[in-house]
Image (cartoon, helix red, strand yellow):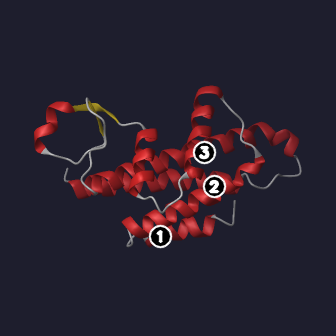
């Protein structure tokens, strides 16, 4: 598979997973009259929304790295580095670099974009996956700022993918 096809496939799936998380947030925003009976479902769905959104962001960030000729595979040296034919022996083809490493790279590479909300969301995602942590209702700011960050990044990296930017902009006020 060529690079463009890989990047497009990764972006498409990342956008899909991200959108699934957004849809969960929107669907479970309203607390129905019989909220007490649906509380467990609401909590589970919000947790899954965070997991989906962060996983989507991770796939999108990896697609951006690939698109800019960076490697996403774990290496025996400190990633990410530019792709080069001679470093094949350093690749671990089974594993990709951790999202926290990618996030640090993005903070340096895109220093004018604020990644604090994505960092916080990733921390909550890890707590959900490993401890089943609850999501505070006051965390709406993380989602809206994450949507803003992703909008800025998309406009810079993929200006032709307007449909996803539209989803980000429209969803911001619905959650």
Q: In which quarter of the image is residue 71?
A: top left
User: Could you tell me if residue 60 is visible in this image?
Assistant: no
Residue marked by disc 3: 120
166 horizontally vs 104: left or right:
right
Residue 24 place in picture, x, y as percent: 64, 51
Q: How far apart are marks 1 and 2 (CA)?
A: 19 Å
Q: How far apart are marks 2 and 3 (CA)?
A: 10 Å
Residue 143, numbered circle: 2
Which element carries disc 3, helix, strand or loop? helix
User: Could you tell me if residue 144 is visible in this image?
Assistant: yes
Q: Residue at x 69, y 38 (%)?
A: 44
Instruction: Tell how many labels.
Output: 3
Residue 42 place in picture, x, y as percent: 74, 43
Which element carries disc 2, helix, strand or loop? helix
Vertical comparison of 24 with 87: above or below: below
Residue marked by disc 1: 163
Residue 74 place in picture, x, y as percent: 30, 34
Vertical comparison of 167 with 64: above or below: below
Mark 3 vs mark 1: in front: 3
Q: Distance between the residues labelled 3 and 1?
A: 26 Å
Give whichever of 111, 149 is nearer the camera. 111
Mark closest to the chain's N terminus, 3 or 1? 3
Vertical comparison of 135 with 25: above or below: above
Mark closest to the chain's N terminus, 1 or 2? 2
């Amino acid at each position: 598979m060529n690079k463009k096809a890989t990047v497009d496939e990764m972006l498409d799936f990342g956008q899909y997973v991200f959108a699934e998380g957004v849809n969960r947030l929107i669907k479970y925003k309203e607390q129905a009259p019989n909220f007490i009976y649906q509380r467990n479902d609401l909590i589970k769905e919000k947790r899954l929304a965070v997991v989906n959104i962060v996983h989507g962001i991770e796939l999108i960030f990896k697609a951006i790295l690939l698109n800019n000729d960076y490697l996403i595979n774990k290496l025996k040296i400190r990633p990410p580095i530019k792709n080069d034919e001679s470093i094949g022996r350093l690749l671990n083809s089974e594993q990709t670099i951790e999202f926290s490493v990618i996030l640090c790279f993005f903070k340096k590479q895109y220093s004018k974009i604020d990644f604090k909300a994505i960092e916080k969301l990733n921390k909550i995602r890890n707590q959900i996956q490993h401890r089943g942590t609850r999501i505070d209702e006051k965390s709406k700011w993380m989602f809206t700022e994450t949507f803003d960050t992703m909008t800025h990044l998309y406009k810079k990296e993929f200006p032709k993918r307007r449909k996803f930017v539209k989803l980000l902009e429209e969803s911001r006020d619905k959650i």
